[in-house]
Amino acid sequence: MHYNLLNYGNITSYCTSSNNSVQVKNAAFRTVIAHVSPHILTVNEISDLPYYHEEVLDSVLEPVFPGRYARAGFSNANGSDIVNDLYYDQDRVVLEQAYGIYCDVRDADAYALALLPEVPGGDTAHLMCIVTHLKAGSGTDDEQDRATMASDILNWLTNMGFTGNILLMGDMNLKSSYEPAWYNLTQFPNAAVRFYDPVNQPGNWTGGSSFRKLHSQSTHTSSNGCAAGGGLDDRFDLILSSLPLLEGSNGLQYVHDSYDVVGQDGLRLNGSVISPPNTDVPDSVAQALYAMSDHLPVTVLLRYGPGTPVEEREAGALWLLNPSAERIQLWSARPLPQAEMELYTMEGRLLWQGPSPAGESHFVLPPVLQAGTYLLRFRPVHGWPVSLKAVVK
């Protein structure tokens, strides 16, 4: 789920503690979270003060689902007043690495995640979520800023060598699919990092009645000084997918027709989320969406594919001897790359960390272990992190 939180904790001359109260937003946000129950939540427009990132965790997520969520963190080399973050369900998701992507106007953030199967013993899948908030505005300069920011993200992916299961999530402020930014995202010269619209709906989104089920802004028909007015007539909030996710070729697959703008039933072109009565969500949720932000959240479902291969291109074909006795043994089909390794209990306690024996194809981890299940994270200097489950008997 991706959600623009509308200046959460960021007090401005127009978004004040009166018309954008954090306490009011928290109560509404709790209702939305209880309704959607996302495994992964990415956000835009949260204050650059870490206090408010913890506030979401402590006052929104924790009261609804105690002990379930953790926070990934954010970058802000650009020094913006509003930034991104990611929250994740610790029972199903492991944060492997967080990256800052320096972009024109404001930074993007990339989060490499390992997704743990619901059924014990299943394969771990890997997913990267990139969170962006492209420049707002209708001018030519604004369009060019959005195009530059999109290119910054794609160039970063290319330079880092990241491919595979990737979602691009954010408030992209795009008026249509004819903007240069959209062209950059979907027609980038490196085809391996191009993004695709899961619903395949190109066109002039702003004000277009044929796109009314995709409009995510604004939840208000009139402005209260902070929330924008004008009603729901813009498709600003998007989740875009890499090709492997659409094809299911890398262990995860986008669930067909699962793309959803929460609270958008297609009956409110230029109208608010609460009037006419909402047929997509209960009235309490519609009221919460209205109180929380002038954007609606967007969600997608991902399912495990038939198998989850290790990212061989970057980390080598890795596997563990399972089960093993006392010490964990790591094997590789070709010489191991330079990497950092971390061994965790399934509760998340770090037991050991150290470098890989670069150039070797077999390594016995030093610690003597009791019987149980462990998680080995392999973080190559170049390429995708890999998480492998180890069983000691």
Image (spheres, helix red, strand yellow):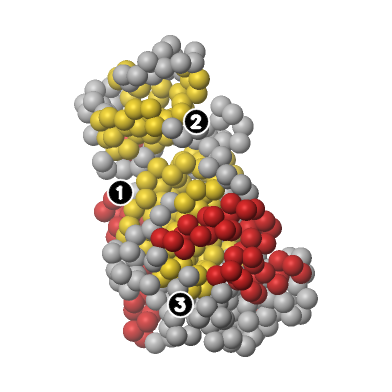
Q: Is disc 2 in contact with disc 3, using a CB cutoff of under 8 Å?
A: no
Question: Which residue bears the numbered disc 3?
Answer: 11
Task: Assign a secondary structure to mark 3.
Answer: loop
Give the vertical position of 45 relative to 37 (above or below).
below
Front one among 241 and 32: 32
Front one among 81 and 117: 81
**Coordinates of residue 59 in the picture (x, y in percent):** 57, 58
Looking at this view, name the residue that lies furthest to the left.
Answer: 359
Any mark on residue 346, and which?
2
Q: In whole angstroms, how far apart are the C-alphas of marks 3 and 1?
A: 39 Å
Q: Is disc 3 in contact with disc 1, using a CB cutoff of under 8 Å?
A: no
Q: In whole angstroms, how far apart are the C-alphas of marks 2 and 3?
A: 40 Å
**Coordinates of residue 252 in the picture (x, y in percent):** 53, 43
* Nearer mark to the viewer, of 1 and 2: 2
Q: Residue at image x 42%, y 57%?
A: 130
Give the vertical position of 308 relative to 298 (above or below).
above
Q: Residue at image x 33%, y 57%?
A: 100
Three-letter amino acid code at the position of disc 1: Gly
Query: Which numbered disc, 2 or 3, marks the residue that appears first in the sequence?
Result: 3
| Crowd band around label 2 with a 10 angstrom C-alpha radius: few (<14), some (14–19), many (20+) | some
Q: Residue at image x 76%, y 80%?
A: 276
Any mark on residue 161, and which?
1
Three-letter amino acid code at the position of disc 2: Met
Any mark on residue 239, and which?
none
Query: Which numbered disc, 3 or 1, marks the residue that appears first in the sequence?
Result: 3
Task: Assign a secondary structure to mark 1.
Answer: loop
Residue 382 at least partly seen: yes
Front one among 333 and 232: 232
